[in-house]
Image (cartoon, grey):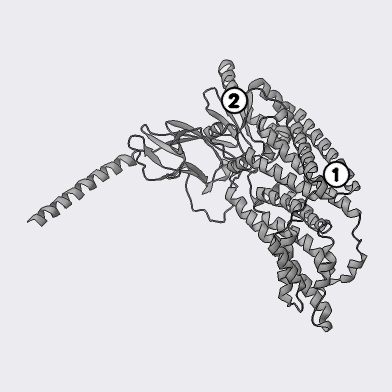
Amino acid sequence: MRKIYIFLFIIFSLTAYSQSFNSLLNKNTEAIIVFSLSTNDNKITVKANIPEGYYAYLESKIANKILFFADNKEINTTYPKGEKYHEDIIIKGEQEFILNDIDINKINFIKTTYQLCSAKDNVCLQPQSKVIYGEEIDIPDNANIITDEKPENATSIENYIKGSNNIFITLILIFAAGLASVLLPCTYPLLSITVSILGTTTDSKKNKKSSVLASLLFALGVITTYTLLGAVVSVAGFAFHKTILFGSIGYNPIVLTILVLLFLYFTFSMAGFYEIKAPSFLQSAKTNAYAKKNQSIFHKYIMGLLAGIVATPCAAPIIAVILEIGFLNPVFATLYMAVYALGFASVLFILGTFASILTKMPKAGTWMVYVKYIFTFLMMIISFYYANILFGVLGFNKISYILASATILIFAILVYIIKNKTAMLSLLEKKIFVSVLIISIALGSLYGFIKQKSEVSNMISYTEALELSKQNNKPILIDFSAVWCANCYELKEKVFVNEELKKFIDDNLIFTEVDVDKYKNISDEYNVKWLPWIIVIDSDKNILYTKNSFSSFDDKMALSIKEDLEKIINK
């Protein structure tokens, strides 16, 4: 009898739960967003009326955010501001979305997907999909009706290659650096030793063929070492490369200080004040490998691996620059080091295959001193570059180039005092070093002075801009930027200087610049995802206009922005 009661209780409970669930489901299905659509030139405005007591997501880790699609392709959408809710961004009530770069005459339908949540109990309803224009039809996967829009300045292979020929120029320069590394004072004397070993074979009848194969395997060993080093940097770059987050980490004062000291250390090593040596066990392994007689062909590859490792400290200043560039562009880091190794190893391969060429190469002499100090000069310029950025980040923008020059000069004096007796530099080397130091500081200071003078100083802060907006009833144009953002400088120096755009902004808007590193709370408030990023807001912080995709940085872009701003002002 007891079991019957329990069974009836379970049946009753399930029935009640089912009725309750159906009631809730029926109630929830009534909660939908009402959309209305209007067109203006090449922009489509969508007004969304979110029912009272509910909210929708713009950004969320757990729920579906509002998205718009044209023929099943996601549309580049300008979203409203939204409000912070825990770790997400939500919107309520009536909101407005702008669908950019859509020709309504060339598409079949527009639909939206979203998910509503109850503000009362935070229970989210089932995700919804609704056609708000046209009639939905099946679109083939390979249809090319509308292209996916991406921020044209964001880090990606296609944008980097399409945007410029930088990658090809970079690869040529890196290959040349690999060739030039052979001429360094610490590697050049080893050429004759390496080539003589590569030319030694056990079969005299096949000497030529064996020399080619041995040289090829040795070169592949060197290339393997440096390519693996590039791969490690590539993985690290991808791990940290998170748009604004990565830039903030990469240009943190602590990180910049380490970079400045590291490059200064490499600079004075290149100048001959001290030597960066490989660990003794690697030196011993290389010596033993070179000393072995009757080596197998595969042994030549092992020699190449060890030679690459042991030669790394000698070429450390050059390799450090390439790795730093690779870290900023992790897609290409492995390729950069492979190309560098190819330049370095190609010389060894040619000399190992055609040993007679070695006799025609210049003997080690005074010319190598000049080669050494050419690299010293380049390293010192790089050190100045990072020191200048460091002091700019620390807030000394107006005198950053002076402080950078002072840093290099003080470091040089300290190294000279500490290492002068043990360095054993000749009088010629000392004279050249002093000349390089003076020229580097002079050129760096001149560059910093010109750059500082060319930049338009903006004395209006974000807070002051808000106050002025309330007083003058003018919208605010906010330019989000950072000291590490190269395209932000392009925008400032090539777009905002346009006379027509500049005059329009001065007459109709209040301009302010926000550094995303110094004022992260402001960039988070407006959901800034990458740079450059500009917005126009009213005195109540409502976003009136957003521009975060720039196909170029020229007068054409300036006039395009001016045209967009005119529409906002004339509304």
**Residue for badge 1:** 433
Left or right: 177 in relation to 122: right
Name the spot of residue 356 as percent of width and height, x first.
90, 70
Question: Residue type at mark 2?
Answer: Tyr
Q: Is residue 146 visible?
A: no
Q: Which residue is mark 2?
A: 462
Q: Is residue 429 above or below residue 393?
A: below
Which quadrant of the rendered structure holds the N terminus? bottom left
Q: Position of residue 537 (x, y in %)?
A: 56, 27
Horizontally, residue 300 falls left or right of residue 111, namely right
* Residue 215 sits in quarter: bottom right
Amino acid at the residue labelled 1: Phe
- Point out the image quarter for the C terminus: top right
As helix, strand or loop, the secondary structure at mark 2 comes to helix
Residue 512 or residue 277, whichever sits in front: 277
Q: Residue at x 72, y 40 (%)?
A: 386
Above or below, comparing residue 308 to residue 558 in the picture: below
Q: Seen from this angle, which residue lies furthest top? A: 471
373 is higher (above) or lower (below) than 288: above
Calculate the distance from the C-alpha at mark 2 to the C-alpha at mark 1.
Answer: 47 Å
Query: Quick one: label 1, few (<14), some, or many (20+) residues within 10 Å?
Result: many
Q: Earlier in the sequence, mark 2 or mark 1?
A: 1
| Image quadrant assignment for residue 51 | top left
Kindly report which numbered mark, 2 or 1, lies closer to the viewer in this rendering. Answer: 1
